[in-house]
Image (cartoon, rainbow, N blue to C red):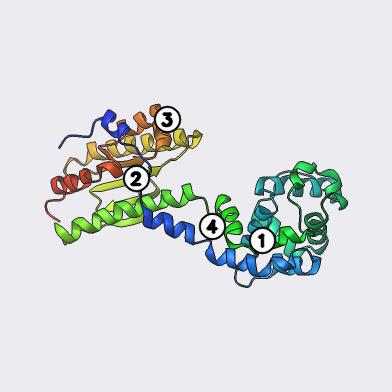
Amino acid sequence: MEKLSFEIWKNTMSFVIDDEFDNSFLLSIEPLTKFINENCHKFSNPESLSEFLTTNDKFPPIIKLKAFISLIGLSEERLKRVVSLVRYRFYNEVFKSEWDIKKISSTIKSDSIFKNNLIDFFIDGRNSIIGSEIPLYYMRNFKLTNQEFINDLKNHKYVERILNDNEIQGKYSNRIGTHVEKIIQKKLDSYKASVNKNLTYEIQKEFPLFNKNIDILIPNVNSPIILIESSYNITTGSGQSKRADQLVELYSILMKHNANHRNNKILMLNYCDGFGWVGRQNDLHRIYDASDFVFNQKNLHILDNILDNYLPKL
């Protein structure tokens, strides 16, 4: 069978349309939203806010910290800068690298001085030791002593919008990228149910030839016939060039293997989708050249054709 042309592949790149997934993603914030609504009255009290940010009850402290700073308009990146200032200015640390949000959350729990200084900053803003060194712009939504603001935090829709906008439950782009693999798996399951009940496949298994995990191996890692790698990009970035570099290297290794094992050739299929790839056509073309076959959500039927042609004995 013929490989899909690059132009057709490129021109069929699209957003993943899966309303069930999107609705599930949006609803995943519901329990946390309700928890904020029920506990926001504690935010203006230092002791209560301390308890909120350190206890592991319905939600782990790191999730509550992420949600809390979103509600007061302080992004994770800005919190990192604030903490860097605290470490450098007040702790006299020999500064080497920033702390991530996980480290900040754990230090809030383990270091009472650090915790109290941050909580004073969150509540008192410019009137705190930390706040005296922070631009007012960063603190424009530090309104925990304002009852009207607390009342806003009791509003489900208000909090839900903020938490969803800040993707507290994980980046949508990351989650939908992972979901793409499930779309492929669903297609394989459909083929198994309707065409070949003996079809088997494995997901995220380390393939010794590459010394890395492969997204999908058919029928299994010990005797692979088809390898499938998937990538979904909403935006563009240097990571796409690195991804292309990796796939080109893997395909080169595979071609050497196939040249030495002509009776046991392995196919490389690449699923790429999302308009982020349209903006990186040079990288996309490199992936195209490093593939035996290519497909995306608009061309999922190609997978059926490949299975028909290359797995007749399964």
Three-letter amino acid code of the residue under disc 3: Arg
Question: Label 4 is placed on what type of residue?
Answer: Gln
Depth check, mark 2 against mark 1: the one in front is 1
In this rendering, the label closer to the viewer, 3 or 2? 3
Mark 4 or mark 3: whose residue is earlier in sequence: 4
Question: In the rendered image, which quarter is residue 37 located in?
Answer: bottom right
What residue does disc 3 label?
280
Q: Quadrant of the N terminus?
A: top left
- Mark nearest the camera among 4 and 1 is 1
- Quickly name the residue at label 4: 169
| Label 3 neighbour load within 10 Å: few <14, some 14-19, many 20+ | some
**Rendered image: mark on residue 3:** none
Residue 275: x percent and y percent? 40, 36
Residue 107 in sight: no
Going from N to C along the chain, the mark reached first, 2 or 4, is 4
Task: Kindly tell me whether residue 20 is visible in this rendering.
Answer: yes
Mark 4 or mark 1, earlier in chain: 1
Residue 153 is labelled as: 1
Q: Secondary structure at mark 4?
A: loop
- In three-dimensional space, the C-alpha distance between marks 3 and 1, rounded to whole angstroms, equals 41 Å
Disc 3 and disc 1 in contact, CB within 8 angstroms = no
Q: Amino acid at mark 2?
A: Glu
Q: Which of label 3 and label 1 is nearer to you?
A: 1
Q: Across the whole image, how many numbered discs are drawn on residues?
A: 4
Instruction: Report the Cα–Cα distance between label 4 and label 1.
Output: 18 Å
Check whether the beta carbons of the residues at disc 3 and disc 2 lie within 8 A of each other. Answer: no
Please, what secondary structure does the residue beneath circle 2 have?
strand
